[in-house]
Image (cartoon, rainbow, N blue to C red):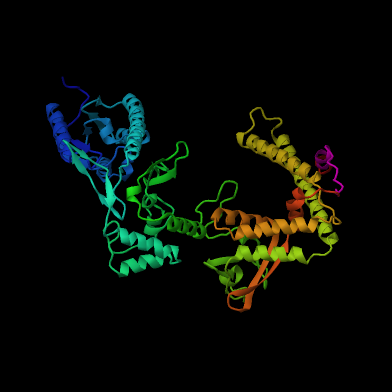
Amino acid sequence: MTDDRLDLSRTAIYARYSSPRQKPTSIDDQLLDCSRYVVSHSGEVHAEYSDAKQSGGVSIYFRTGIQSLLNDCVLGHYSAVCAESLDRITRNQRDIADFYQQLVYMRVMLVTLEEGIITPLHVGLKGTMNAIFLQSLSDKTRRGQRGIVRKGRMSTRAPFGYRNANRIEGSQVERGLREIDPDQAPIVRRIFSLYANGTSAKAIAKLLTAEGIPTPSGGSTWRHNTLVGMNSRSTILSNRLYIGEIVYGATRTVRNPTTGRAVPRPCPEEPPEIQSVPELRIIDDKTWNIVQNRIIATSRPRKPPPGLPSLPKGAKPLTPVLRCAHCGGGINSLARDRWACTASRARNRCQARTFVLRDLETLVAKRLVQWIGRRTKWDRVVGEALAALSRRRSDLQERIDLNRLQAHRLVQVIKDIEAPPPSIVAEIAALDREHASLLSALSEAAATRLPSSQSEDLKPALLAKATELREETESSHPYARLRAAHQLSRLLDAIELSAGDEPGRPKMHIRPNVLALLEWTKSSLQPTSRPEPLPIPMGRAHASTSSRH
């Protein structure tokens, strides 16, 4: 029975299949079935589009076939688009709705063999069902792969140093078995030995390329990130299979909806599956541990650990407190270990030379230890800290007064308006939140107690904490070094730098933040002095407001 609403006079057909394991003839079968459907409804097929080996979870914006179809629909070439079913177009909820809305806008009908003429009801229900199917399929696939790992097999391709060892047992093929490749295993041992003895990954890659050794993918040029990198699943020096362990489930791949790129992420909700396969061991434990410690010591975290702020690209934790000793301007890193005054680089306002400085954080921490060690009397230091604390409290009180004044003026503006503008209401709410935060900070400042300048434990406590901080800057773990650098930036007002008389030995002068130093160490001491807190008059904001009118 023919639907009167169908206009298949100019129909485009779309077909897709997902996995490389599926038959390519699947597309031909889909196109044939759709063509028969169109002809049976007195229509005519004008064009055919397809995407091979493309998962339904991949966005339509990253599939060439369906994008060509949409581009031709924009030109008005077709009256209808036909597919076997909605899940052949996409299983992504957002994409199916977007695809349907675009066709509606272009007055192109969407028809499938399974659902018929597509309506918003189909888009909502089938979109949800397809999304649930994808999630269920992902969970079942991971469960099946975990079962494969428990049997000592692998569901991925054989890493460098191994080869497939599939065998036939009766009438079935035993897949996922691996064995050591006698030709590639010595190369793996050599890579680990070179790196453990101090050779960099880049140098090893150049050496392997020069010797004409094929890469794991069969290419001729080795890259250092093939040997070591953040993705331990695909880097040789971090692959635990070389010590006889198959690891599955440490990460989970998710697809970025904007770029379409598959991104591996840690999978903390379930522990990884680890299966011992001692017959596949190539590297001994001693060499493995040396290599892993060196990887940690030389790596730089891409993201800051929890509790630390992210930094702009190229910035370092100490960058905000670095100052040029000649002009007082900022100092930035030009390249690794090379620094320059920003004024000299930007507008030639400073004649300071660039200089080389290695291990900045460690050198600064050592200078801080030396600064503390040279202090014999602490009256001046504690006095400066008390003055800074008083200024902090005064500044907070001034900000509170200004905050209340701004809020009072906004309230006066809207008090006679029945329906005040939402933007002003939101601004008043933001000022109220800021007021609560400022009051909390002022109360904390008023309750701050600093150690006495006469305390015999002050200098030993400061030295102990500064020495511990210096040791953290020399840690082999990158996160420990990063935390130590952030702590140093909070303890210093400025680090003045300039090129020294000898290469690699610049001049350095630190200016500690004495208030931050004493607050940092007060937890290790029994405070015996307390600065007199400034009163916090509740009506001060209102009094200052009325005095201005």
In the displayed image of the protein, which residue is found farthest to the bottom? 501
Q: Is residue 349 left or right of residue 48?
A: right
- Residue at (31, 58) in percent of width and height: 185
Where in the figure is residue 66, as x and y percent of width and height? Answer: 26, 41
The segment highlighted magenta reads: 529-544
Q: Is residue 406 above or below residue 465?
A: above
Looking at the picture, tell me which residue is in the foreground, 232 or 24.
232
- Split into 4 quadrants, where in the image is the C terminus? top right
Asked whether the viewer can see residue 97, the reply is no
Where in the figure is residue 304, as x and y percent of width and height? Answer: 55, 51
Occupied quadrant, residue 100: top left
Q: Is residue 143 left or right of residue 521?
A: left
Where in the figure is residue 302, as x and y percent of width and height? Answer: 49, 53
Q: Is residue 383 left or right of residue 234?
A: right
Asked whether the viewer can see residue 99, the reply is yes
Q: Is residue 514 above or below residue 544?
A: below
